[in-house]
Image: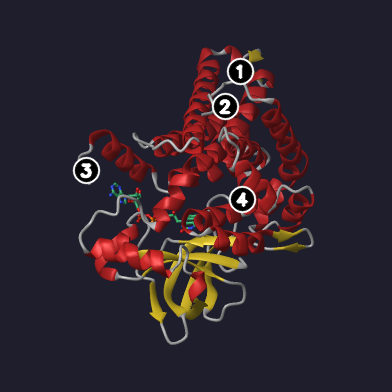
Amino acid sequence: MTTPSFDLDQDHLDLREWVHTFAADVIRPAASEWDEKEEFPWPVLEEAAKIGLYSLDFFATQSFDETGLGIPVAMEELFWGDAGIGLSIVGTALAAAGLRANGTDEQVGEWAPQMFGSPGDLKLGAFCSSEPDAGSDVGAMRTRAVYDGATDEWVLNGTKTWATNGGLADIHVVTAVVDPSLRTRGQASFVVPPGTRGLSQGQKFSKHGIRASHTAEVVLDQCRVPGRCLLGGKEKLDARLAKARDGARSGGSNSSMATFERTRPAVGAQAIGIARAAYEVALDYAKTREQFGKAIIENQAIAFALADMKVSIDASRLLVWRAAWMASQGKRFENAEGSMSKLFAGETAVKVTTQAMQILGGNGFTREYPVERMNRDAKIYTIFEGTSEIQRLVIARAISGAPIR
Ligand SMILES: Cc1cc2nc3c(=O)[nH]c(=O)nc-3n(C[C@H](O)[C@H](O)[C@H](O)COP(=O)(O)OP(=O)(O)OC[C@H]3O[C@@H](n4cnc5c(N)ncnc54)[C@H](O)[C@@H]3O)c2cc1C
C-alpha cells in the first residue's frame, strides 16, 4: 500500500507545473471570451490536444497513478485557469469514467480512444444519465433499452438532459432501464457509437456559469446499437438481473452511481481550483486597494475573511486528496468520504468566490474582474454530480446505517 504524504513527489510537482503553465498561458487569457460567447472552445481544446493534455494517454496515466493524486492535482490547476474551459477539456473524462466503471477491458480498449481522437481530429465523449424527471432520483429514469434478439441489437428510446458535451460528442455513454420492475437495479449502460441513427441533440442550455462548456439534451428515438455496446456484456447483465429478481441484494451500486463514486474527488478538486483562483485575486486586491489611507487588508474584517477562505480551501484539498488516495488503494468509502470531499469543496467554492466579490467591492461585481465569473462558475459545484443535499444524504446514511430519506 502506498503511504499518504503531504509532500508531493517530483512527478506530481512536474505535473502541477506543466498543467499550471498551460492554464496560465492558454486558458486564463481565453476565459472571458468563451464565457461571453457561450460556445464550445474548440481552439483551446486543440491546443490542449497538441501538448497531450487532452488525450486518453494523459487521463489514463493519471487515473492509474498509485497515490491517486495525479487527477486532483491536474484538475485543480486546470480549473484555476477557468472552469468553463476546464470542463470542456475534462467532460470526455466523465464519459470515459462511465465506460471504465461498467465496461470490460475490450470495451474500454475499443471505445475510449474514439472519445478523445487526436490533434487535428478531436473527438468528444458524453455521459448521459440525467433525465427531465430523473435528476437526483436516478430510480425514476425512463429511457428504455429493449433487446432485439433477431438482430442482436439494443433499441434505446428516451430523453436525456443536461449532458455535458451531449449531441456534440462522438461517443455517448447512456444509462437506460432494461427491467423497470427492478428500479435502479434494472438499469444498464450502453455506448452509442459515432454517427448512430436515432441519437440527436435536443435543446442546448444557456447557463449561469461554466458557459464555455456545452450542456444539452440528448434525444434517443429508436436508436439501435449492436449487442456489444452493452457495457459489461449480456451474460453479466442477465446474471445481475436474475439475482435482483430473486430478491438478493446486489451489494453494489448501479451504473450511474458507480461512475459518480469514482469521479467525486476529481469534481471536488475542480471546485478547489475555482476557489483558489478567486482567493488569489482577492488577496492581491486587498493588499493594493487603499481606503481610509491604508490597504484594505489592514482591516481585520478583510484579513480574517481571507484567512477563513484559505483555511476552507486547504481543508477541502485535504478531504479531496484523502478520498482520491482511498480510491487508489481500493479502500471502501465507509463514511462516504468521496461525497464528503465533493460536498465541502463545492460549498467552499461558492463561499470563497462570494467573499472574493465582496473584497473587490464594486469591481467584484463587474466583468472587468474575473471573480464574478468564478462565482457564477462555482455554483454548479453544489448541483451537479449529486447536489449538496444528496451528498449529505449519502454521508448521513453511511455514518448512521439508518434509512434516512
Ligand atoms: C451544467 C450541468 C452539467 C451537467 N452535466 C451532466 C452530465 O454530463 N451527465 C449527466 O447525466 N447529468 C449532468 N447534469 C445533471 C446534474 O447531475 C443534475 O442536475 C443533478 O443531479 C440534480 O438533478 P436535478 O437538476 O434534477 O435536481 P432535482 O433532483 O430535481 O433536485 C432539486 C432540488 O431538490 C433537492 N432534493 C432532491 N431530492 C432530495 C432529497 N431526497 N433530499 C433532500 N433534497 C433533495 C436537490 O438537492 C435540489 O436542491 C448536469 C447538470 C448541469 C446543470
Residue under label 2, please give it. 359
Residue under the image location 40 percent in, 48 percent down? 386
Circle 1 crowding by C-alpha within 10 Å: few under 14, some 14–19, many from 20: many
Residue under label 4, please give it. 90
Is label 1 in a helix, a strand or a loop? Answer: helix
Residue under label 1, please give it. 296
Q: Earlier in the sequence, mark 1 or mark 2?
A: 1
Q: Which residue is nearer to you in this view: 219 or 263?
A: 263
Closer to the eye: label 4 or 1? 4
Q: Earlier in the sequence, mark 2 or mark 3?
A: 2
Q: Which residue is nearer to you in this view: 382 or 95?
A: 95
Q: Earlier in the sequence, mark 3 or mark 4?
A: 4
Q: Earlier in the sequence, mark 4 or mark 1?
A: 4
Q: Which residue is nearer to you in this view: 52 or 107?
A: 107
- Dots 2 and 4: beta carbons under 8 Å? no
How far apart, in angstroms, are the residues tagged by discs 4 and 1? 38 Å
Residue under the image location 30 percent in, 50 percent down? 251
Is label 3 in a helix, a strand or a loop? Answer: loop
Going by the image, does 238 lie left or right of 21? left
How far apart, in angstroms, are the residues tagged by discs 3 and 4? 33 Å
- Dots 1 and 2: beta carbons under 8 Å? yes
Residue under the image location 47 percent in, 46 percent down? 262
Circle 2 crowding by C-alpha within 10 Å: few under 14, some 14–19, many from 20: many
How far apart, in angstroms, are the residues tagged by discs 2 and 4? 31 Å
Residue under the image location 57 percent in, 27 percent down? 359
- Dots 2 and 3: beta carbons under 8 Å? no
Q: Earlier in the sequence, mark 1 or mark 3?
A: 1
Give the amino acid type for the residue marked by disc 3 in the picture. Ile
Is label 2 in a helix, a strand or a loop? Answer: helix
Q: Position of residue 307 (x, y in %)?
A: 53, 18
